[in-house]
Each structure stands twice: as structure tokens, then as C-alpha cells.
Amino acid sequence: MPAAATPNNSRTAPTRRTSWAEAAAVADAQAEVEAGPEAPAEVPSPVSASAPALPTSQPATSRRAVPAEPSTPPSAAAPQETAPAAVPAQRGTSRQAAKLAAADAPVSDFITSPGSFVRQQKPRPRGGFRGALFAMTGGAINLGPGPRQREEDELGRRISRQLQGSYNTAVLSLKGGIGKTSTTVGVGLTLAEFRGDAPCAIDANPDSGDLVERALGEGIYQQASPRTITDLLKNIESVDSLTALARYMHHAGRLHLIAGEQDPEVSDSLTAEEYLRIRKLISGYYSVALTDCGTGVTHNAMSGILQSADNLVIAAGYAVSGAKRARSTLQWLAHHGYEDLARNAIVVITDKDEVSSRVDKDAIEEHLSGICRQLIAVPHDRGVADGDLVTLDVLRPETRRAYKEIAAAIVDGYV
């Protein structure tokens, strides 16, 4: 074994590693010395040049300074109680410095933001130059989505937001043939595309509404079970589950529909109380419902529809008469106790007949935009104008975009 019992004074003593607490204590002591006579008495450094080195495993706060032999008699010396008092002061200073240092120590990035160590991946661009470049390079070059795609993604986020409760939007107009039912189907299919829960559309048109025919196609609807809203009302007491309710529903993909009554002698008999019973039943299974109201605001079921509606879509067309009727509808609502519905209504102008250039579209939009929450224009599209089946796949991108804007505005009104 190497003989190293007696230290060699001619050699430099090895540097001993100190803890951060010791370093803090030394810094505090040095600050007290520099502070001048007003500062407390100097605290001796825990590392003394004349004292033997202590094992590094021993905590700094457990070391005590060894007092020197007194050079004067005890009777003439200063009170000895003050000398040992410096040691507890040193201990308190060290502990306080350790606490302050621990509080000021930077928190690990992994604790504050555990995902910061993973580089966020840009969304994949769809279409256009950005999408082509992404495909050509196998994803090596990703410029991210362009402004148009970001707007589309934001619309999808607004449509798909989670809702607490069940909400109902009524789609109405004072004139027929201006895109009311096609708007109900197009918006319903859009809601079904983006939302996690299936929406429901109710045909409450008293004039033999064709909501289901526009969503399924007339041929498919004729082959389907002819159950209508009248059949549901007759057996509503026995409907106690979604499975039982499905017997009275039609399905266009994820859009669930309740057909209107086709018999003219019966179709106008739906009352406000009966509609409210249907609405109460639907609210237990669907978070979003659309109600195709037909034309007018005074038929039997209309008071129940307006009473249970959370917001409205007013259908209008690019014609002077259509704009005036839409404005008259909003004014009637405001004067009959539905000010909030009128103020928060969404006016949808559908260019169904592709009006001539003589029509001042900007003037019509300006005429309506100031009396509603939002005005959205649906461009001319043969997939809407033909009055037949409405499917998103055959619609123009501009038309689909308009239906997304309507759907997003509807859900915005719920929250």
C-alpha cells in the first residue's frame, strides 16, 4: 500500500470539490465582508487553509469550526457566548442560500415543455404547387399548407368543435324555389362530413317537402320505407332508443333525415306542440339538428320551430323580390319577439338561376348584410339548380366552400 499518511508540505494540496451549498455560503460571506462595518460579523470560510481537508462526502453544513485557545483569562475575555453563535449563523445562511439557489435554478425544459425535444412536423400540403413538390420529393421538401388550405382547415375545425347539449337551426324563407331545401341538404352533408357525431335534418315543410328526395334521390326514396314524420308522431311513445328511432329515419351517408308528410291533406296538420315533441325526442340523440321549415313564418308548426331554434338560416335569391322578402322575414321576426334570432341570423343568397349581369349583386348583398350576423353567397351550380339529388362529390369547389362557411357559421352560433 502507498505510504501517504503524512502530507508533503512541499506539494500543492489537491483541490477538493465543493458542493453548490458551500459555494453559496462562501459567496454570502464574501458579500458580508464587502458590505462594510454595518454588515454582520465575518463568517469563516468552511474551507480553511490550515485545517485538514475533510472527506467530500460529508455535508458542508455539518462541519464546525474549532475555536482557538483563548490568549487571555476567561474573566478578562469577551463574552464567549458570541463566538459559537457564528456557527449557527453560518448554518442558517447556508440553508437559506441553498433554498434560494434551488428556487432560482432553471427548470428543465422537459418538465415545462416535454414536447420541445420533438421537432413539430408541418402539415402535409394538399394540391397546388406545394402539394406537387411534396409528392415529387417524397415528402423531403414540405413547404406546409398554403393560405387557402389553412383557411379550409380552420373552417373544418370550427365545424367539428365539440358541443355540450343539443342545438337546432331552422332554415326558412318567404318564397319557394330559392335554394332553401338544397341549402339544408348541402349544409347537412357538410356537417356530417366534418363532425364526429351524425347530424339530423327534419322536414317540417307543410307543402309536401322534398328534403329526403334531394338527399337520397327520388328513385332511392321511392324504394325505401315510406315512413314520415306523421308515422313517428303516431308511435313516439314507443321510441325509447336510437335503434327504435332509426326505423323512422332515412340515411344519406352520415346525415340522418326525417321525411315530411307527402299527403297534401295531412302535411299541413303538423302543429307547434307536435313539432316540439319531435324536437325533444331528437335532442336526446343528436347534438345538431336542421329543420327545413318550408315557406312562410305563420303556418301551424312555425311557432314551435322558432321557439326551439338556436339560430336561423334565411334563404334568399339574387333578385329584388328575393332580397325584399328576406328583409321582410327578419323584420317580422324582430317585431314578434324573436329579436335575437333575427340579429344572429345567417342570410344565404343562392345564385340558383344564374341571374344576368344586369342584376347588381353587390347592391343586394349590401341591402341585407347590415341586418343579420353574416351573409354568405352560394354560386350558381348545376348540382343545386337542377332540383334533384344534391351530393357533395358533384358540386363545384366554390359551392362546397360556401356550404362549409354556412356550417361553420351555424356552429359558431351555438357556442
Image (spheres, rainbow, N blue to C red):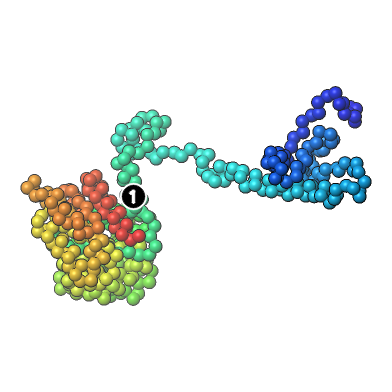
Reply above or below: 167 against 110.
Answer: below
Horizontal side, residue 293 vs residue 20: left or right: left
Q: Assign the N terminus to one quadrant of the image.
A: top right
Reply above or below: 405 against 57.
Answer: below
Q: Find residue 202 and report its image quarter.
A: bottom left
**Secondary structure type for disc 1:** helix
In the image, what residue occupies the spot 80% across and 36% down?
48
Residue 60, can we see it? yes
- Of 48 and 379, nearer the camera is 48
In the image, what residue occupies the spot 34% across and 76% down?
237
Residue 24, can we see it? no
- Of 87 and 271, nearer the camera is 87
Using a 10 Å C-alpha cutoff, classify the residue at mark 1 as few (fewer than 14 neighbours), some (14 to 19) or many (20 or more). many
Residue 304 position in % (x across, y down): 25, 72
- Of 342 and 409, nearer the camera is 342
Q: Find residue 292 and report its image quarter.
A: bottom left
- Give the residue type at disc 1: Gly
Q: Which residue is mark 1?
A: 156
Looking at the rendered structure, the number of numbered marks drawn on it comes to 1
In the image, what residue occupies the spot 10% across and 49% down?
360
Residue 220 position in % (x across, y down): 23, 57
Reply above or below: 33 against 141.
Answer: below
Among all residues in the image, which is located at the extreme left? Answer: 358
Residue 212 position in % (x across, y down): 23, 60
Residue 174 position in % (x across, y down): 14, 64
Q: Assign the C terminus to one quadrant of the image.
A: bottom left
Q: Find residue 108 and report its image quarter.
A: top right
